[in-house]
């Protein structure tokens, strides 16, 4: 079968989940994300990002004002539906509809949502939209090869490790080797079913703790 391009680049729409809602990043999210970034331990989560931890709310507002949905990176805010607060952000990157390939990147999952069903559903909503709605063939995850938590997360989410691009770039004055991971369209149906099983409300106790693990391997 002749490979087909994706339908389009992602558009600025809202993606609704059971636990989170993804909506285009805007000025209204700045105060929430600044609060998450400045809570104890919040700044440490910028260690591997291209950006640095913000020092002031005005700095966050300026970053969001500069965000352009038509740029190479298109960011969304991750809204906790229980509280209505923005707890993180993530972006569409390396958007290549002509090749059917797209990346999730610029991920900042604040401590209140890290290692939780909120983070997993935020990833799932991106993957589902890319594969099921837009027809992408390839969904990428990349990170600094020294970022062990990110590599572990990629594996947990069902991405396949593809290798390391040595001395790929210079970030924050340091040389970065980049680890590449991907999910391709033929793998997605089984992964989608497992995500939906794991995210079902009956897989969590009254405190939100999982009863079974996400089994992507």
Image (cartoon, rainbow, N blue to C red):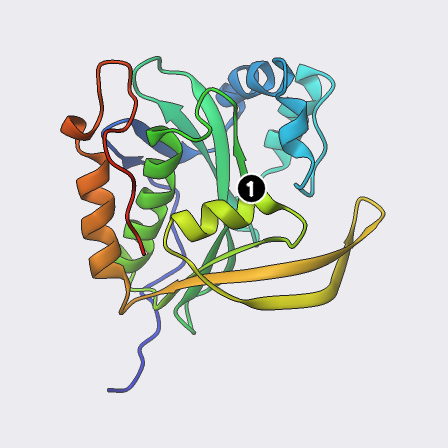
Q: Quadrant of residue 137?
A: bottom left
Q: Left or right of 101: which side holds 70?
A: right
- The quadrant in which the C terminus is found is bottom left
Q: Which residue is mark 1?
A: 149
Q: Nearer the viewer, residue 89 or 157?
A: 157
Q: Position of residue 149 (x, y in %)?
A: 56, 41
145 vs 7, left or right, is right
From this view, report whether residue 92 is shown above or below residue 59. below
Residue at the (50%, 44%) spot, across then down: 91
Out of 190 and 53, give the one closest to the viewer: 190
Q: Quadrant of residue 1?
A: bottom left
Q: Is residue 162 left or right of residue 56?
A: left
159 left or right of 132 in image? right
Q: Residue 6: percent from the left, percent from the top? A: 34, 67
Out of 122 and 94, give the one closest to the viewer. Answer: 122
In the image, residue 84 lies at what x, y percent?
36, 15
33 is higher (above) or lower (below) than 104: above
Q: Residues within 10 Å of mark 1 (few under 14, many from 20)?
A: few
């Amino acid at each position: 079968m002749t490979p087909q391009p994706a339908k389009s680049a992602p558009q600025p729409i809202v993606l609704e989940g059971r636990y989170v809602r993804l909506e285009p990043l805007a000025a209204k999210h700045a105060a929430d994300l600044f609060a998450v970034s400045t809570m104890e331990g919040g700044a440490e989560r910028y260690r591997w990002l291209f950006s640095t931890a913000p020092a002031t709310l005005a700095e966050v507002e300026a970053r969001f004002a500069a965000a352009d949905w038509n740029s190479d990176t298109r960011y969304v805010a991750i809204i906790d539906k229980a509280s209505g607060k923005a707890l993180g952000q993530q972006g569409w990157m390396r958007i290549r509809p002509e090749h059917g390939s797209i990346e999730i990147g610029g991920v900042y999952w604040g401590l209140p949502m890290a290692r939780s069903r909120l983070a997993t559903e935020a990833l799932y909503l991106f993957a589902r939209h890319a594969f099921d709605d837009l027809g992408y063939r390839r969904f990428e995850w990349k990170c600094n090869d020294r970022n062990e938590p990110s590599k572990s997360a990629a594996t947990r989410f069902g991405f396949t490790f593809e290798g390391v691009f040595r001395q790929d770039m210079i970030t924050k004055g340091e040389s970065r080797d980049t680890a590449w991971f991907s999910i391709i369209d033929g793998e997605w149906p089984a992964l989608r079913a497992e995500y939906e099983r794991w995210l079902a409300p009956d897989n969590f106790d009254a405190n939100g703790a999982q009863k079974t693990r996400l089994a992507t391997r």
